[in-house]
Image (spheres, rainbow, N blue to C red):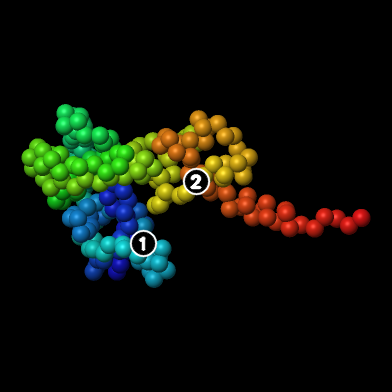
Amino acid sequence: MKYIVDYGAMRLLGAFTHADSVFRHGSRVIVRTPRGQEVGTVRCEATPEALETLDSEYVEGQILRSMTKTDEMEYRKQRNLEQVKLERCRKIVQDMGISMKLVRVERLFGGERLLIYYTADGRVDFRELVKVLAAEFHIRIEMRQINVREGMKLLPVLGDCGREVCCGCFLRETPVVTIKMAKQQKVTLDPSKISGHCGRLKCCLRYEYDDYTEKRKAKKSEKPPEG
C-alpha cells in the first residue's frame, strides 16, 4: 500500500509505501526519506487523485513502522533538546556577528543531520558557521533559509481568532495576499488589525476574496429595471 504522509518540521508531503500494514488518517509513523529517518503522519491513501494534488517534485520513501511508545519518548526527548541546541546556535551566530535570525532547530529522528531554519535579508555566507556548528554538535548541519510567513509554521502561535495560525496547522503553501483584497472586502485597513504575527497581511484575507469578486461582477452585470 502507498500513503501520503507529511513529515518534518515544515510538514513536507511525500508518498510512502508499506508492504503489510494498513494505516489510517492521523497514524504516526517512522518513515525513511531522502534525508534519513523521520517522524511522519499519515494523511490518506496515495490514490491517483491524491497524488495529483502534490507538488511535482514530491519525494517517495518507505514507512518503516508505526511509532511505538519508545519512539514517542525518544521523539519528545529530541524535541526538548532542540530548544537547547537552538539557544546555543543563537549564541554562536551572535558571537560570529552573522546577520540572520534563527527560527527553529530540527534534529532528524534517525540522527542523520541537524536542520537549522533561519530568516535573513538576502543571502548569507554561512560556510564558517556550518563548520563551527558541526564541531559543536558532531552531526551534519543543513541550513535552510525561509521567509517570515514560513517561519510561522515552525512556531506555536495563536491567531487573533484564538486558534493556531493557519500556516501552522493546515496551509501547505503561503497564499498571495494584497491590500486590494482587504479593500474589496471592506475590512479595516489599520495595519495592526489586518497584519499577522509575521508582520504580513493575514492569510485569511485571501479565503473569501474570490467570492467577493464574483459577487461584485454579478452585481455589475445585472440590468437596471425598466421604466
Q: Is residue 18 visible?
A: yes
Query: Measured from the top left, where is residue 183 in percent x and y?
Result: 60, 41
Residue 25 is drawn in which quadrant? bottom left
Which amino acid type is marked by label 1? Asp
Q: Is residue 96 above or below residue 65?
A: above
Distance from the alpha carbon under mark 1 to that under mark 2:
21 Å
Q: How many marks?
A: 2
Residue 19 is drawn in which quadrant? bottom left
At label 2, counting other C-alpha atoms closer than 10 Å, the crowd grade (few under 14, some 14-19, many 20 or more) is some
- Which numbered marker is on residue 177? 2
- Residue at image position (19%, 55%) is 35
- Residue at image position (31%, 45%) is 146
- Residue at image position (54%, 41%) is 179
Quadrant for the N terminus in the image: bottom left
Choose between 49 and 22: the one closer to the eye: 49
Query: Measured from the top left, where is residue 65 in percent x and y?
Result: 21, 58
Q: Is residue 92 above or below residue 153?
A: above
Tell which tag, 1 or 2, sits nearer the viewer: 2
**In the image, is 196 to the left or to the right of 81?**
right
- Residue at image position (33%, 57%) is 13
**At numbered mark 2, what does the secondary structure look like: helix, strand or loop?**
loop
Q: Is residue 137 visible?
A: no
Quadrant for the C terminus in the image: bottom right
Q: Which residue is mark 1?
A: 55
Query: Measured from the top left, where is residue 161 in percent x and y?
Result: 50, 36
